[in-house]
C-alpha cells in the first residue's frame, strides 16, 4: 500500500521580451514586459493498493501484479476564486515472463499499464484527465555464471494519452510594441 498527499501553492508570471539577434546576441539589453500573474492552490490525495507475485516454475519466471488507485484532486484558482475537484479510481496491471537458460541467458517479455492523475484544469476550468499508458518490453538478460555482473538489452514501446501541457500565451511570442486589437 502507498499513500501520498500533496499541496502546492503555485504562482507564475508570464510576459514577453525583446527579440534576441542570434547572429549578434546582446544579453541583458532587452525589455521585459510582465503581462500577468496567475495564482493556484493544487491538492492531490492518492491511495494505492497493489499485489504482485513472482512465480518460478522450472526455468520459467512469471511476474504478475495489479494495483488499485483512489485519487482526489483539486485546483483552486485564487485569481477568479473558482475551484474544481476530481475523484478517480483506476485498476492497472502488469505481467512478465522470462526463461532462464543454464548458461545465464534469459529472454523476457513484459506488459504494464500506468496511471498518473493531473491536478490542473483546462482552459474551460474542467479537470484534466489522468495520464494513462501502456508499455510493452522485450529483451534479453545475461549473467555470466559465477559472477554478479548483469548485462541487459531491450526494446520497448510506450504509449500514453492525456499528457498535460501548458499552452503558451500568444502575447508571450508577440514582439514588444505590437498590440492586438
Image (spheres, rainbow, N blue to C red):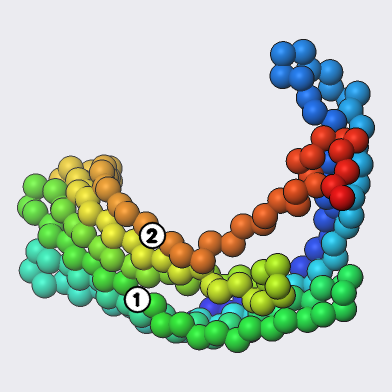
Would you say 115 lies left or right of 39 here? Answer: left
Q: Position of 54 compared to 145: left or right? A: right
SS category of the residue bearing label 2: strand
- Residue at image position (87%, 50%) is 181
Q: Which image quarter: residue 177? A: top right
Identify the residue position indicated by label 1 in the image.
Answer: 93
Which residue sits at x=92%, y=32%?
31
Observer-nearest of 169 and 92:
169
| Badge 2 or badge 1: first in the primary sequence | 1
CA–CA distance between discs 2 and 1?
Answer: 15 Å
Residue that carries the numbered disc 2 in the rendered image: 159
CA neighbours of label 2 inside 10 A, class few (<14), some (14 to 19), many (20+): few
176 left or right of 97 in image: right
Q: Which mark is residue 155?
A: none
Q: Position of residue 94 (x, y in %)?
A: 32, 72
Residue 17 in the image, given as x and y percentages of width and height: 85, 35
Query: Where 58 falls versus 16 (above or below)?
Result: below
Q: Residues within 10 Å of mark 1 (few under 14, many from 20)?
A: some
Task: Report x, y in % for residue 86.
Answer: 63, 83
Amino acid at each position: 500500500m502507498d499513500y501520498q498527499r500533496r499541496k502546492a501553492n503555485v504562482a507564475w508570471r508570464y510576459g514577453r521580451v525583446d527579440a534576441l539577434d542570434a547572429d549578434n546576441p546582446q544579453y541583458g539589453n532587452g525589455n521585459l514586459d510582465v503581462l500577468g500573474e496567475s495564482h493556484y492552490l493544487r491538492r492531490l490525495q492518492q491511495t494505492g493498493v497493489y499485489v504482485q507475485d513472482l512465480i518460478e516454475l522450472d526455468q520459467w519466471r512469471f511476474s504478475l501484479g495489479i494495483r488499485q488507485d483512489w485519487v482526489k484532486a483539486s485546483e483552486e484558482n485564487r485569481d477568479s476564486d473558482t475551484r474544481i475537484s476530481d475523484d478517480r479510481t483506476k485498476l492497472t496491471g502488469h505481467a512478465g515472463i522470462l526463461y532462464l537458460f543454464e548458461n545465464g541467458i534469459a529472454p523476457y517479455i513484459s506488459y504494464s499499464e500506468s496511471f498518473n492523475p493531473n491536478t490542473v484544469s483546462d482552459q474551460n476550468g474542467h479537470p484534466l484527465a489522468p495520464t494513462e499508458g501502456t508499455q510493452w518490453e522485450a529483451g534479453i538478460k545475461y549473467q555470466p555464471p559465477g559472477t554478479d555482473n548483469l548485462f541487459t538489452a531491450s526494446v520497448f514501446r510506450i504509449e500514453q494519452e492525456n499528457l498535460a501541457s501548458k499552452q503558451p500565451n500568444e502575447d508571450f511570442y508577440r514582439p514588444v510594441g505590437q498590440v492586438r486589437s
